[in-house]
């Protein structure tokens, strides 16, 4: 049989050589095309004979059949696990208690400043002293007036007592007694009004002392002695106190997550600047969508930590989906065809490992893992390496 094949190949070579000589000697384009068509037919005839002989030889000589080479792949056991999906956002640290200090009873000229930027401030601590000279003068005048009224009241009471004693003895007229009593009552009202006026003026004087209403750090102190203190210089606060012991993280959540984020949702907050992560929960979930960026505001409380500072960048991961005993596989092992998503698994059949294509239904995707709702079972072996160019039923081998 091999001799026969060699004869055919030799004949084909002689024919091709002869045709080549004829082609070189022919200068006609038509003759060349005719020779080319003849060669194609002869080539196809020889190829068909070779193929037929190979088929007959394979049937008669089984040792000539090449065995399929098993493809080397890597597999991973499919197991169940808890699968979670997070919404990854960027936020910032903010303070719950921020106080913009302002005078209680109107502005005034600054006479003394008792705090500087960065100082720790206690609640009720004196921060500024405003000019109170005029109020002091008013208080002094009111006190003198009150003392004069009290002197008049003392005299009026003495007159009334004398008139009363005489009236009891039948001396004097009733109108004199009534007049003396009316004079006493009028002076008592004047003394009381004078004392109330002094209290009001003392309250005004106390307004010249500016105190902190919160505990925290003086984040802004933009006022000097001699300047007018009203609380704000233009749009900037003159004194700003931040309570760094009560902090929160604030982030803007896209509106498409409005149905998934709610108060109490689990949050993982990472502060890359200080390399710390905190577990917390949503304390405030906004109910209004911002028309400018199509998002709503969410807040989560942070524990007290001296390393945390307001306005630090925070990476916020909000848990919006979780499943227990779920199957999650690397997303890069999942392919797509006309039927949907699929993967390849390694299956033992007849003592050999073969690849089998599995159509799957997928769920949520997070990081490099995708949840598989159906199509796979725990205990099966997922092909994770070498799956790119395999086919259903292909012979496999593993390390």
Image: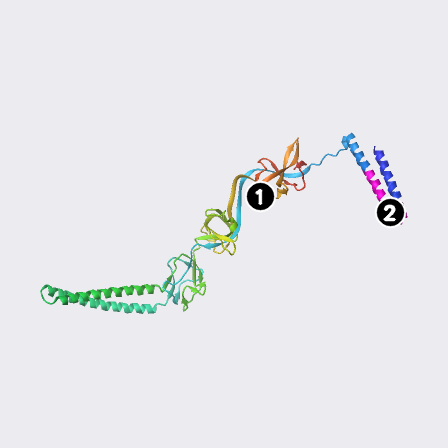
Q: Main secondary structure of the magenta part?
A: helix
Displayed quadrant of residue 359 = top right
Q: Position of residue 17 (x, y in %)?
A: 88, 43
Kindly identify which numbered label has been placed on residue 163. Answer: none
Considering only vertical position in the picture, is 354 above or below 281?
above
How much space separates mark 1 and mark 2, taking CA atoms?
A: 64 Å
Q: Secondary structure at mark 2?
A: helix
Q: Residue at x 83, y 34 (%)?
A: 2
Q: Residues within 10 Å of mark 1 (few under 14, many from 20)?
A: some
Q: Position of residue 328 (x, y in %)?
A: 57, 41
Displayed quadrant of residue 171 = bottom left
- The front one of 226 and 252 is 252
Q: Position of residue 115 (x, y in %)?
A: 41, 62
The residue pinned by badge 1 equals 369
- The front one of 334 and 149 is 334
Magenta segment: 22-47
Q: Residue at x 57, y 43 (%)?
A: 370
- The front one of 157 and 174 is 174
In the drawing, does residue 360 fall left or right of residue 70? Answer: left
Considering only vertical position in the picture, is 188 above or below 23?
below
Q: Position of residue 329 (x, y in %)?
A: 58, 41
The residue pinned by badge 2 equals 32
Considering only vertical position in the picture, is 382 above or below 175?
above
């Amino acid at each position: 049989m091999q001799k026969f094949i060699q004869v055919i190949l030799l004949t084909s070579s002689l024919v091709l050589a002869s045709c080549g000589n004829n082609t070189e000697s022919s200068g006609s384009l038509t003759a060349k095309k005719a020779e080319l068509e003849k060669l194609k037919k002869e080539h196809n005839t020889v190829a068909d004979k070779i193929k037929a002989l190979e088929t007959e030889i394979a049937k008669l000589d089984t040792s000539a059949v090449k065995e399929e080479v098993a493809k080397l792949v890597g597999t991973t056991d499919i197991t169940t696990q808890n699968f979670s999906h997070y919404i990854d956002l960027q936020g910032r640290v903010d303070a719950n208690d921020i106080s913009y200090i302002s005078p209680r009873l109107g502005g005034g000229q600054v006479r003394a400043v008792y705090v500087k930027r960065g100082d720790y401030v206690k609640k009720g601590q004196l921060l500024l002293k405003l000019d109170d000279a005029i109020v002091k003068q008013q208080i002094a005048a009111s006190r003198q007036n009150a003392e004069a009224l009290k002197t008049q009241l003392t005299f009026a009471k003495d007159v009334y007592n004398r008139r009363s004693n005489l009236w009891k003895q039948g001396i004097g007229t009733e109108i004199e007694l009534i007049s003396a009593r009316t004079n006493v009552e009028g002076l008592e009202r004047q003394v009381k009004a004078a004392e109330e006026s002094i209290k009001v003026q003392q309250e005004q004087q106390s307004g010249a002392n500016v105190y902190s209403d919160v505990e925290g750090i003086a984040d802004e102190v933009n006022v000097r002695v001699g300047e007018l203190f009203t609380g704000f210089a233009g749009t900037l606060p003159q004194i700003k106190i931040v309570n760094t012991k009560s902090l929160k993280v604030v982030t803007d959540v896209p509106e498409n997550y409005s149905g998934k984020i709610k108060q109490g949702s689990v949050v993982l907050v990472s502060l890359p600047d200080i390399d710390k992560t905190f577990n917390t929960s949503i304390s405030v979930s906004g109910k209004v969508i911002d028309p400018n960026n199509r998002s709503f505001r969410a807040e989560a409380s942070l524990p007290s930590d001296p390393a945390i500072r307001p306005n630090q960048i925070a990476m916020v991961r909000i848990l919006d989906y979780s499943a227990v005993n779920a199957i999650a596989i690397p997303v890069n092992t999942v392919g797509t065809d006309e039927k949907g998503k699929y993967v390849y698994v390694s299956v033992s059949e007849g003592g050999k490992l073969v690849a089998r294509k599995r159509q799957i239904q997928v769920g949520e995707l997070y990081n490099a893992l995708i949840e598989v709702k159906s199509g796979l079972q725990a205990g099966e072996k997922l092909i994770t390496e070498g799956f790119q160019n395999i086919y259903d039923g292909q012979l496999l081998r593993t390390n």
